[in-house]
Amino acid sequence: MSTEPEDLLAIARRAVDMARRGEEVEAYVVRTRETDVEVFGGEVESLSVAGIEGVGIRIIADHRQGYAWAGSLDPEVIAETVGEARDNAGFGEPDEWYGLATPADVLVVDPPDLDLWNDSLSSVATDEKVRIALDLDAATRAADPRVRGVESAGYGDGMLESAIANSNGVASLSRRTVASAYAVAMAGDNSETQTGYGITAGRSVEDLDFGVVTRDAVERAVRLLGAKQAKGRRIPVVFDPLVTRSVLGVLSSALNGEAALKGRSLFLGREGEQVAAPFVRIVDDPTDPRALGASTHDSEGVPTRRNGLIVDGKLRGFLQNVYTGRRTGLGTSGSAVRGGFKSTPGVGVRAMRLEPGTKSPEELLAIFPEALFVQSVSGLHSGTNPISGDFSVGAEGLMVRGGAFAEPVREVTIASTLQRMLLDVVEVGSDLTFLPGSTAGVTLLINEMTMSGA
Amino acid sequence: MLDQDVLERTLQRALQHGGDFAEVFAEDRRTTSAVLDDAKVEEMVSGRDRGAGIRVVRGDTTGFAHTADLSENGLRSAAEAAASAAHGSAGTTNTVSLAPVEAARPHDVVVLPETVDKRRKVELLARADAAARAEGNSITSVTASYADSRRRILVANSDGLLTGDDQVRTRFMVQCVATGDTGMQTGFEAPGRTVGFELFDQFKPEDIAREAARRATVLLDAVPAPSGRIPVVLKRGAGGVLFHEACGHGLEADLVKKDASVFAGRVGQQVASPLVTLVDDGTYAREWGTYAIDDEGAPARRNLLIENGVLTDYMWDLVRARKEGRASSGNGRRETYQHLPMVRMTNTFLLQGESDPDDIIRDVDYGIYCVQLGGGQVNTATGDFVFGVTEAYLIEHGKITAPIRAAQLIGNGPEVLSMIDAVGNDFDTWAGTCGKSGQGVPVSSGQPTMRIREMTVGGTAA
């Protein structure tokens, strides 16, 4: 486990050296070390300390592509994986646009200077991590007499390193650390339960704000006590930053160049058109060190950059990887992403955000005489569709009247279409919040959605 | 996969600092998949994962570590890491002697996918693509994928258990996009079974593709879904997800014991309409959630959860069951050796009733008829759950009329279960992936055609 990160690049290069004449070979090598503590009822429920290693090999020959992966960095296994990828390439159909990143792709922009690795994490004792989770559990339980229990509290961190090398001479090494802690509070007596979630995240333990976790978890659970199904109607809706973050995640699928190329985006053919309210700006900026998804390079070894997606309400364009960039003639935007070493690079965001406005969340609440404040949504995967744009999700939160929270609401749905919602944005809050994942949170006010309920 | 004496020494090492229980879970998984998109086979992917997870339980605490190194040294390091995570103190010298147990197989796999030429797997994709596109010019995008996996597992624990399983699964998926004047709509169909290549004797790629294409095309004419509380009829197979979300998760003992389920403390009570008899059956031959043993070595079982509306029992894993002094119900599962097991469903379904499915629809004056659901989510502590419909129609004056656009339905578990007022005499199942605490496992759900007297439909129609 004491191997230096440079070794990963050496491992990747050794795999690439197995390329045969006429083959392009890419090796993606990953190593992570993770600690995960979960606490329940004042006791450590589980403590897991583990490392994961793996390799993914992509081979392109005669315009055909094959892929193979293995959860091991054993040289014999890697050699076997190269053989499997080679064999698999024979079964794909040819496509002239297949190819790996070239030095020309890499030279377009300089990689951002980012320090995403906080070595202090490696010196935090496991006992201290356990203590953090235990303290969060205790503090959450003690914060308010209406909190009946803590469904779970936990701490997790990871030290993640990855290397990419290919036979065109492109090579990159990325490393980053992440640490986070959370708690889920349960409020109410035996006749009713409401839950609330709080989270904090950063590059190491010193970045974490445990007070925020307890405050959010408790406040979110307690303020829902007594929640009832509201009567259905059309109503202005205010999204909590955690909700906006999730909605951006759905929207990101529609801004993906692969989806556009294959006719699977609601934005198909709409470049340059007004798709959102004129002040809406959406960017993906992995060069911003505040974003937990920040990265110097993408998953094909290409330097990342700030990409405007929707500017002044107009659709600027789609994100591209090497393949979609070649086929469209637009070039890669440094937006290749992978779901780990087990898959080929797709296209996606790493640090997407709605550019914040100037008004505070409190000011947003006061814009309409009545609105629904949505604290959390459910069923995002089953009720939203980035191709048709249909959007219908379960919601809980509070009614807002005269700028102040009124009665809590549960068991309602809110529905519209993604197309409509973008045009219906009234105001973006000033409270940009960086959270784990590839999208950032911010309070958002939508002019009108259909609330279904009683 | 591993020698018995190595396992015994590893378990002894795991308990060297004390502990009530230790376990080695080893896994060797090989997968093959192929994707066709944009009218061509994009790639074939093969993968291999092999390793072991070791846990040590001491009181309420579980220490866990995993390794991809299956040598005795690799296992020893993981055992020591798990032992120190469990924070033992008193060194006891436990002797572990293992007694191998052969688990009964729920069914035989006929054609191991690894014996099938990759060429034949790829051909299925082209057949699906052609069939989907033949459904009409409105089909503008077809994605087809094939996936098989073979997962060999071994479980050895300090109770002396030594057992294993060989799990083969095959799945085929087609997604179509149809484009019309109203924009784009999608259709999806994805049968999966715990079988080998014989999956395609039961499901032809052309049929799967046509179904996905039909679904997308139908939705082009869809009207906005209703908004509000109305009767909901779920076609056989489609609605199993409702039980998975409305009560399945709430009957998982880990959540129950944390007081994070609305069904906690309700065994013996009426929690659903008397028409509801619900089972979770890991032995159901060939189904997507079936296995011989769970990921803690307990044989799969058919567990009765709700009988005529009365809650009979929860689902259990080993750790939760030991604390209660009872046996596991065979529901301890994990995604891979890198994960800790927890209570999970297998194949969860509602037993048949007596109503004619046509009558169930005919008795509705205004409501919706759901043919396919797209998954759901539940907060077990509050009981509130949602599920999305991906193919549904209006019911007007007892007749199925216009298709409606995708929408979410929302309800509260115990309340919705009590409002089931008709259960049909037909039956079908549905394969999916269930996610819990970041782990995905294959499950199926099933039911006869059934009706909920009233449920909130989250559309946009006035």
Image (cartoon, rainbow, N blue to C red):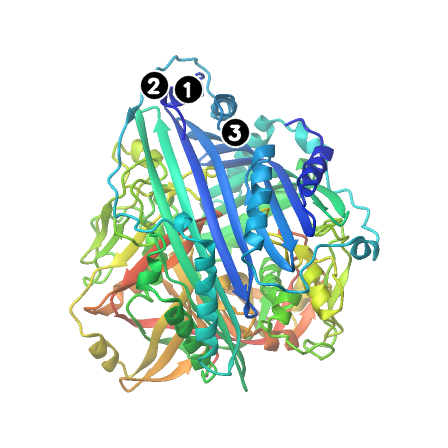
Residue placed most toward the observer, A437 or A165: A165
Is residue A45 visible in the rendered image? The answer is no
As drawn, the label of residue B238 is none
Is label 1 or label 3 in front? 3
Q: Residue furthest left?
A: B354
> Mark 3 = which residue?
B69
Residue at 70% over, 45% down? A164
Residue B142 in view in this figure: yes
Q: Chain of mark 2?
A: B
Q: Is residue A334 left or right of residue B391?
A: right
Horizontal side, residue A244 vs residue B191: left or right: right
Residue A314 occupies which quadrant of the picture? bottom right
Give, as a three-letter code, the residue at label 2: Val
Type of residue at label 3? Asp
Q: Does residue B415 sit above or below A232 in this rendering? A: above
Tell which residue pokes out farthest to the front in this image: A21
Residue at 60% over, 53% down: A344
Are the residues tagged 2 and 3 within 8 Å (C-beta)? no
